Image (cartoon, rainbow, N blue to C red):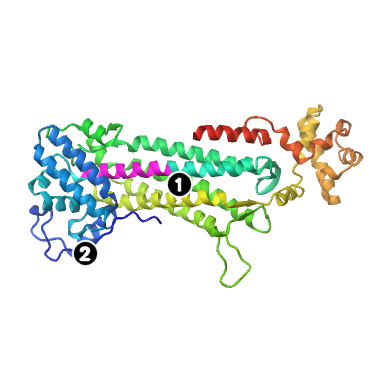
Amino acid sequence: MTDTTPSADLGASPQQPAKAWSGRFSEPVSDLVKRYTASVFFDNRMAEQDIRGSLAHAKMLAKQGIIGAQDLADIERGMAQIKGEIERGEFAWNLDDEDVHLNIEKRLTALVGDAGKRLHTGRSRNDQVATDIRLWLRDAIDRIIALIGDFQKNLLDVAEANAATPMPGFTHLQVAQPVTFGHHLMAYFEMSRRDAERFADCRKRVNRLPLGSAALAGTSYPIDREFVAAELGFDEVCYNSLDAVSDRDFAIEFCAASSLLMTHLSRLSEELILWMSPRFGFIDLADRFCTGSSIMPQKKNPDVPELVRGKTGRVNGSLIALLTLMKGQPLAYNKDNQEDKEPLFDTADTVIDTLRIYADMITGIRVKADNMRGALTQGYATATDLADYLVKKGLPFRDAHEAVALAVRAAEGRGCDLPQFSLDELRAAMAHVPGAADKLADDIFGVLTVEGSLGSRNHVGGTAPAQVQAAIVRARARLG
């Protein structure tokens, strides 16, 4: 998985410093509880977002006269130093300070004194963490949408190269009708297009500012939430303080969009695995996406697509975890919500890594066009075209369906495909359906070819090569 966590020294401080809230308590938290409740192990990856949010909050406090100009200057200077320390891996993360927010605040106070203590005026960790998560998730969504675009561009290249490459289309994993490989791949383009739309739509609900809601009821300080929203690039503020700090539906929605994306990639992975099997032999994958066997020297295993299938279950599990996390929580904030970050982070990491590798893997597909065409001779793929021919000649569809079914049965008995019949043999096979044999003429053999079948589906969304090319042109125009 992608590791974006800052370097961390997560040991507890031996002198057991007082916590930011310890004045209410008569004894310190036990080491076991401290480790059980701390989140700095994983939420320190939101450090950049935490600093960004704190700087916007400090600018607003100074603008409103709640803190002085010198305090703001000191906070900005201290945060710049902290940001550098984190980026260089020099920041000393401390378990005693529980989370990313208190770690940064404590270091700021050590650097700039009372100005650091004033930074938390008018906010709570409840609205602070809700803001940080939204900032982090917004960044992740932007990256995912860009990566979907990379995958789509490479997918279109392979589809365009195979816009007229015939292959069997399947239903129930049985040969159904001829399609082109390009048309088949374009189905996944449409799925990924909807995936990108879902992430973009999800981003709209992520991009609302909780900061200013404080612990749950808002704050008595004369804050300007709209100013902070503008500073941080949020579209609007959250309009109810209780809702703003307590709900994680935006994270659940992100995980739902991720599950659908991974489901689509898992379906494509299953097909790549099947197609690579010698029983299909439709494609080969580049060696860099495969591994061998420790005992069978001939093996070339499609490990990457198999792992995509497996990791889809992992992402689905994160969605269920977040739904379960939220289902019994009363308003407002509860400590349960600390458990939102690990499944959210893992989901984003998994999706990002999968898209990165898939964009490359698509370009490593080698199409075995002869095998694809050969498979079209094994399942009477143009039988529907024969039925359509009879209908166009005036035979009712149900009669045409029965006549072709009889012809297929006869072909099975002889061990041949429909185009291998002579005209008289085809008529004889349909003789039991009144009027069917009379509709047949020599032009039927053009209909029964693979190219004739493909070319007849010449409408928007159809598999005719010209329509596949048109679909690719439209797709490229959408991507820009």
Whether the magenta-drawn stretch holds residue 146 is answered as no
The residue type indicated by label 1 comes to: Ser
Mark 1 element type: helix
In the image, is 422 to the left or to the right of 338? right
**Residue with the most extreme bottom position:** 295
- Tell me if residue 421 can be seen: yes
In the image, is 110 to the left or to the right of 409? left
Whether the magenta-drawn stretch holds residue 131 is answered as yes
In the image, is 159 to the left or to the right of 339? right
> Could you say where residue 248 lies in the image, as x and y percent from the top left?
31, 43
Q: Quadrant of the N terminus?
A: bottom left
Q: Main secondary structure of the magenta part?
A: helix
* Residue density around tag 1, few if under 14, some if 14–19, many if 20 or more, within 10 Å: many
Query: Who is closer to the viewer here, 222 or 175?
Result: 222
Mark closest to the chain's N terminus, 1 or 2:
2
Q: Kindly indicate the quadrant of the structure image that contains residue 157.
A: top right
* Residue density around tag 2, few if under 14, some if 14–19, many if 20 or more, within 10 Å: few
Mark 2 element type: loop
| Mark 1, residue position | 259
In the image, is 453 to the left or to the right of 284? right
Which residue is painted at 58% across and 33% down in the image? 473
Which residue is painted at 18% across and 51% down in the image? 102
Residue range of the region highlighted in magenta in the rendering: 126-144
Which residue is painted at 75% across and 41% down in the image? 450
Alpha carbon distance from label 1 to label 2 = 36 Å
- Tell me if residue 127 can be seen: no
Which residue is painted at 63% across and 30% down in the image? 460
Q: Which mark is residue 11?
A: 2
> Could you say where residue 409 lies in the image, as x and y percent from the top left?
82, 46
Viewer-nearest of discs 1 and 2: 2
Q: Kindly indicate the quadrant of the structure image that contains residue 183.
A: top right
Query: Who is closer to the viewer here, 103 or 409?
Result: 103
